[in-house]
Image: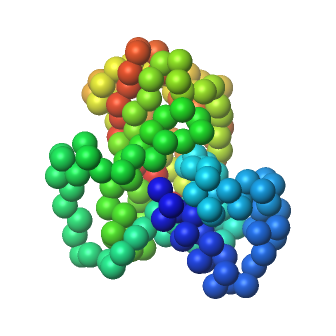
Amino acid sequence: MMEIGINIKKIRKQQNRTLQDVADCCGFSKSLLSKIENGIVVPPVATLSKIAEALGTKVSALLEDGESESAIFTQSQDVKNGPLVHTDKGYKFFAFANEFKDKKMQPCLFMGKKGEVKKHSVSHSGEEFIYMLEGKMRVKVGKVAYELNPGDSLYFNSLEEHGIMPVSDEVKYINIFVE
């Protein structure tokens, strides 16, 4: 998804800021930010959150493309055939409603496979809601681990260290990020 990098670069340049300045604010290297801006690396949501915070914007602004609409309708084939973001953490996701500007939440459909999702823990501003669709996964928030099955949900403060790990071979879940 080249748009993410293009949007980051556009906002950074509008603010007359250097790669080094934004990277320093985020706590990672200038090289990583450059790779993200050029579409070489697709950042996980926690990294996008740090970039958005450094740029004084929302994650949704980094994911947006095109003109704003008053309502966004997504059909099932849009998700099946649409662009999936493949992250370096091993999961992939479909971001809903990219065309909706200045949204207060970012709904995404996440998919992951046991053995492909790398063990990781993140922390970023905002809140999250996870609704489990298929499979079984473990979500650790702070020091507490939750095992989610289809139909289960979890709402938490994203400032808490958190991470996911599939327990079944494949998982599919809705994750809504509130900024």
Which residue appears at 32% of the width and 77% of the height? 68
Which residue appears at 48% of the width and 18% of the height? 114
Side (left or right) of 58 relative to 120 = left
Side (left or right) of 64 relative to 157 = left
Look at the image and tell me whether residue 42 can be seen: yes
Q: Position of residue 53 (x, y in %)?
A: 65, 65
In the image, is residue 12 above or below residue 146? below
Q: Position of residue 85 (x, y in %)?
A: 45, 47
Side (left or right) of 6 relative to 76 = right
Q: How is the image coloured?
A: rainbow
Q: How many tags in the picture?
A: 0
Which residue appears at 55% of the width and 69% of the height? 6
In the image, is residue 5 above or below residue 56? above
Q: Position of residue 44 (x, y in %)?
A: 58, 46
When asked about the image quadrant of residue 172, the answer is top left
When asked about the image quadrant of residue 23, the answer is bottom right
Which residue appears at 30% of the width and 50% of the height? 82
Look at the image and tell me whether residue 27 can be seen: no
In the image, is residue 58 above or below residue 137? below
